[in-house]
Amino acid sequence: MKIKNICCIGAGYVGGPTMAVIAQKCPEINVTVVDINENRIAAWNDEDVNNIPIYEPGLSEIVAEARDRNLFFSTDVDEAIDKADMIFISVNTPTKTYGIGKGMAADLKFIELCARQIARVAKSDKIVVEKSTLPVRTAQALKNILENTGNGVNFQILSNPEFLAEGTAVDDLLNPDRVLIGGDIDSTEGKEAVSSLVEIYANWIPKERILTTNVWSSELSKLTANAFLAQRVSSINAMSELCEKTGADVNEVAKAVGMDSRIGSKFLKSSVGFGGSCFQKDILNLVYISKSLGLNEVADYWEQVILMNDHQKRRFAANIVKTLFNTVSGKKIGVLGWAFKKDTNDTRESAAIYVTDYLLNEQAEITVYDPKVKAEQVYADLDYLNSRPEEENRKRVKVVNSPYEAGDKAHAVAVLTEWDEFVELNWDDIYKNMLKPAFLFDGRRLLDRKEKEKIGFEFYAIGN
Ligand SMILES: NC(=O)C1=CN([C@@H]2O[C@H](COP(=O)(O)OP(=O)(O)OC[C@H]3O[C@@H](n4cnc5c(N)ncnc54)[C@H](O)[C@@H]3O)[C@@H](O)[C@H]2O)C=CC1
Ligand SMILES: O=C(O)[C@H]1O[C@H](OP(=O)(O)OP(=O)(O)OC[C@H]2O[C@@H](n3ccc(=O)[nH]c3=O)[C@H](O)[C@@H]2O)[C@H](O)[C@@H](O)[C@@H]1O
């Protein structure tokens, strides 16, 4: 079946960029991205394409090309569902904050609402594609909801997890290592549905990189990929602590280990801890699923990846306190970087939030600079932790527009996101305006130790 109209429910970090690229590469398909968040849709439709709600290198150019040609953003979810032959579900699947599975399981209420809405609105056959990251066997639940509507509509359910990373979303979408499509490959209808999605991607991706599997393998592969990636970061971070105690340098160790082609060099960069909306949530979900199936050893194995990450954030913050003569009370500390990695304005689960919270508990005064994150976001992230009254966060955390202001009269500066511009700063000037001794903590292995020590900094870097 040739797809003419696509609807994507959820105009977030995945729905927006993914659909923009499909629209760009398939001008004959109409793509409508819908969301219940009116502000988000208004921003996607903003006349000035630089104001779209998600910052990703190269994205605004693609949106500018396709928007209002065959790419549309709307809040009219029913209409878009009704028109579509294929519906992507790309809504958020956060960790549950209540009830059974609280703090572990994925909250599937948004997914279920989408399924019920599709069931209610659909008058013609549809292919429903799981784009969100979901627990293995979610497709079964979707099928039950969709097939019990009794209005004679046929649904095929596919799993097509997304592997893009933020900051490189456009590149990842244009040139993915693989695209994964899971479907009911034992039935003719299932095979047809799979091949109609394969044909869309084949417009720009070589067919040998489009992998088809059964639905359960596809769902589980997504959780597995994130667990493996996060595990590599926790593994190298565990070694970073050992390096600090023994005179080894974690960068040298990572290079030596990564040159073994069986291990590979990517994703071995030690840091203040991984953040982002997915690693923690997806591993917790994996732990929950394993426990639910009675697989306690499997659950414990993966949980350790999270425990190590929590430890890394905490020990970085604790080291600041210890180094500043065991107290940061009333001391100004400049935080450079709030996003969970460079080239994104996303701050979800960013290590900076937790390090700052720790330092605030030690009564520090914090000044934050991030080139892409707005002040309201910084406060919202801290308020969300509920560690202190909201007014206190506003009183003790200042968000500034320049890295130099963050360092001005500070006792210490901590680099928490690896923004390129931090390498190029005039560190002599920052040093001059700081209190002495001037402490510099590099949570990203971004800065050159020798250079900084020559300027006069007391320098601390993860794993060195
Ligand atoms: N952020 C990332 O880099 C990646 C995320 N994922 C997965 O993709 C999914 C979406 O993630 P993000 O795009 O980051 O989330 P997001 O929170 O940025 O976007 C989700 C959007 O869905 C909307 N929404 C929720 N319920 C709705 C409903 N019933 N009707 C219409 N709109 C609704 C929300 O308003 C929100 O704008 C998650 O399952 C995530 O695990 C997968 C790969 C990468
Ligand atoms: O499911 C998802 O949401 C996505 O999660 C990650 O993408 P993302 O979180 O956007 O960014 P990553 O580049 O993976 O970085 C995650 C965190 O790990 C940290 N990291 C990464 C790599 C590394 O070597 N060291 C390290 O500390 C980053 O700084 C960041 O805080 C995966 O890389 C994507 O494949 C996946 O689609």
Image: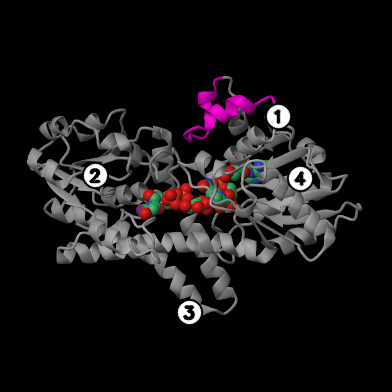
Rendered location of residue 103, percent (x, y): 51, 62
Q: Earlier in the sequence, mark 3 or mark 2?
A: 3
**Amino acid type, callout 1:** Asn
Instruction: Using the rendered image of the protein, determine whether residue 293 is visible from the camera's viewpoint.
Output: yes
Q: Can you tell which of label 4 and label 2 is closer to the viewer? A: 4
Q: Which residue is mark 2?
A: 414
SS at mark 1? loop
Residue 58, magenta (yes or no): yes
**Amino acid type, callout 4:** Met
Callout 2: 10 Å neighbours few (<14), some, many (20+)?
Answer: many
Give the alpha-carbon distance from disc 3 to disc 2, as whole Å.
37 Å
Front one among 387 and 436: 436
**Amino acid type, callout 2:** Ala
Q: Are dots 1 and 3 in contact, CB under 8 Å?
A: no
Q: Which residues are magenta?
A: 48-72
Q: Which residue is mark 1?
A: 70
Q: Earlier in the sequence, mark 2 or mark 1?
A: 1
Residue for point 36% across, 57% down: 265
SS at mark 2? strand
Quarter of the image where one finds residue 79: top right
Give the alpha-carbon distance from disc 2 to disc 1, as whole Å.
45 Å
Vertical comparison of 400 with 115: above or below = above
- Describe residue 385's horizontal placement relative to residue 361 as left or right: right
Q: Which residue is mark 4?
A: 86
Rendered location of residue 272, percent (x, y): 31, 53
Front one among 260 and 87: 260
Callout 3: 10 Å neighbours few (<14), some, many (20+)?
Answer: few
